[in-house]
Image: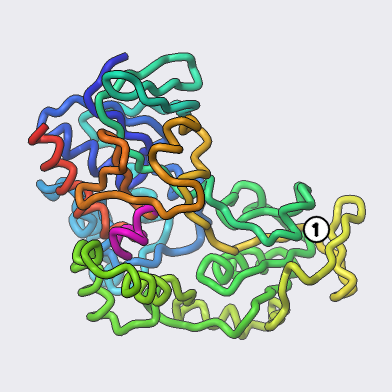
Amino acid sequence: MKTTILIVGAGPYGVSLAYELWRKNIDFVIVGKPFDSWLSHTLTDTAIRSDHHASEIFSKDKKFNLSTFIEKNFPADAVEIKKSRLPNALFRAYLLDVLHKMPFSFYKKQLLSLEKSENGFIGRMEDGIQIYAKKVVLATGIGVHKKLPESLRKLETKQVHHSWDVVDYEAVKGKQVMVIGGGQSAAECVHHIKKQNAVTWVLRKTPVFYSEPINLPKPIFKLLLQLSPAFYFMPSALKRILGRKFVETTITPDMEEVFHSQDATVIIGLDADKMHWKVQGDRLYSPIMDQAFDHIICATGFHLDLRHLSFISDSLMENIQDTGGPLEVDFNFETKVKGLYIIGGMVEPVYGPAQRFLMGMRHSTLRLGKVFTNG
């Protein structure tokens, strides 16, 4: 199979770019399960965090306008729905509607390897198909970047889950469950799990309850995201300072009642790596707490690193990124390897905080649409 552009990843960034290339009649193939993180790795009874105006799949022709979807499908409740966080079930319905409107198909298989060739790149798929592409855009998801406490990761037991692996714990009933983490995902896990289980919530420090993902006034937060491309031109030292501010962990105020609820035991100041975990049959025991748990859910975030993408060949990886060095991309999202581009969360340290959020796809889609149109 030959194509001009190979898009690896069918999440919001990949889908938005693919639609823009389709509009411009540029040949492409997009591989991956469409919107898999949202459809398969979020709790059904939660809500998405970003405002509705910043949560839609970007398209220049506004084909996937989220407000229009809400007004059409929930006319009686549209005004109220748009005032608060969108229920995840509603957002999933929106994403499925987006997929229904897509004028192209997805190659819903896993990419096993990506190598540089004389005229571009070769991608080998799990079904044996080889895709020859002149250019490649990496718009991969976050699943491979899951971060677990070191002591629990070493245990290699089925009782330890990352909050992203929803299917492993969503239906748990009548168990002793520990949730570790001080952010939104941890609060949502506790909110869901405590309905039918005994839950202990462990945090290193008292959480910050704030409506936005970072503790800044909403107008400033929105302005910074809109101006995010300017981040690329800032001095490295300033990028690091601002970057630390943007990764501050917060929880939305509507989840504060979960923290104060009597339905879960909350423990502050305990480090998961200092609990001296021991495997006892099908349970995990901590002598520090003198308690055993059936399941431990780690809402401990993600560490985005290109080197976690095992499908990239060693020789290609060496040319993209120096060992131990930071990822480098230019203003067109192109890496040091000509024809290879990266968009989304992995380029946040270089390209700005908007690349962590759905809002960031607007700039990457418009930028790469222009780059690929010009050859």
Side (left or right) of 177 relative to 72: right
What percent of the width, then of the height, locates residue 88? 42, 58
In the image, residue 75 sits, relative to residue 262, either above or below, namely above
- Graded by Cα atoms within 10 Å as few (under 14), some (14 to 19) or many (20 or more), the crowding at tag 1 reads some
What percent of the width, then of the height, locates residue 96? 34, 42
The answer, for residue 173, to whether it is visible in the render is: yes
Magenta part, dominant SS: helix
* Amino acid type at image mark 1: Asp
In the image, residue 162 sits, relative to residue 212, either above or below, namely above
Residue annotated with mark 1: 294
What percent of the width, then of the height, locates residue 342? 32, 44
Quadrant in which the N terminus is drawn: top left
Q: Residue at x 88, y 59 (%)?
A: 278
Is residue 92 or residue 33 the one in the foreground?
A: 33
Q: Which residues are magenta?
A: 346-356
Q: Residue at x 59, y 51 (%)?
A: 166
Side (left or right) of 199 relative to 213: right
Is residue 97 or residue 362 the one in the foreground?
A: 362
Quadrant in which the C terminus is drawn: top left
What percent of the width, then of the height, locates residue 247? 43, 71
Is residue 207 or residue 305 the one in the foreground?
A: 305
Whether residue 347 appears in magenta in the rendering, the answer is yes
In the image, residue 30 sits, relative to residue 154, either above or below, namely above
Is residue 83 or residue 374 the one in the foreground?
A: 374
Side (left or right) of 52 relative to 177: left
- How many numbered circles does the render carry? 1
The answer, for residue 14, to whether it is visible in the render is: no
Whether residue 164 appears in magenta in the rendering, the answer is no
Q: Residue at x 65, y 64 (%)?
A: 193
